[in-house]
Image (spheres, grey):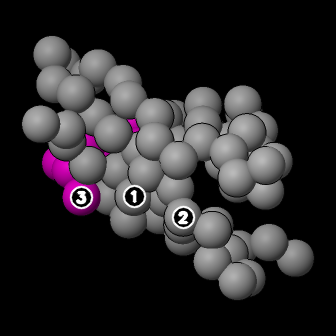
Amino acid sequence: MNKIIIENRTDLSDLVALQHIYSVIDKGRISNFGKQYCYCSTFEVNKKEVVVWTYLNKKSDRFVIEYGG
């Protein structure tokens, strides 16, 4: 069984955050020799850059969504 952890550091709604995380998951595990979702993906939302970072934990995948610089 897989576990997904999501940390939303923005004021985006949970639905919008999940939509961006879904687009990362939909591309598959393309980083770390096919073991991990894309390390860093960027999107534009309301003229702001939004970044999704992914981390591979021992028993889970962790997604952090935050505003870019």
Furthest-front residue in this view: 33
Q: Secondary structure at mark 3?
A: loop
Q: Nearer the viewer, mark 2 or mark 3?
A: 2
Residue at 80 percent across and 72 percent down: it is 2
Assess whether residue 48 is covered by the magenta stretch: no
Give the spatial CA distance, label 3 vs label 1: 7 Å
Asked if residue 4 shows in the view, the reply is no
Q: Which residue reaches farthest top?
A: 47
Disc 1 designates what residue? 64
Q: Position of residue 18 (x, y in %)?
A: 50, 44
The reply to whether discs 1 and 2 touch (Cβ–Cβ < 8 Å) is yes
Query: On residue 9, which mark appears?
Result: 3
Residue 29's x, y, as percent?
A: 76, 45
Give the number of the disc on residue 55.
2
Distance between mark 2 and mark 3 Cα atoms = 15 Å
The answer to whether residue 16 is above or below residue 1 is above
Q: Nearer the viewer, residue 68 or 14?
A: 68
Q: Residue at x 38, y 65 (%)?
A: 7
Looking at the rendered structure, the secondary structure element under dot 1 is: strand
Please tell me whether mark 1 or mark 2 is closer to you in this view.
2
Q: Nearer the viewer, residue 69 or 50?
A: 69
Residue type indicated by callout 3: Arg
Give the vertical position of 7 relative to 20 (above or below): below
x, y (%) of residue 39?
Answer: 53, 47
Residue at image position (22%, 27%) is 49
Left or right relative to 34: residue 30: left
Q: 47 or 19: nearer the eye?
A: 47
Residue in the image at 35% along x and 50% along y:
65
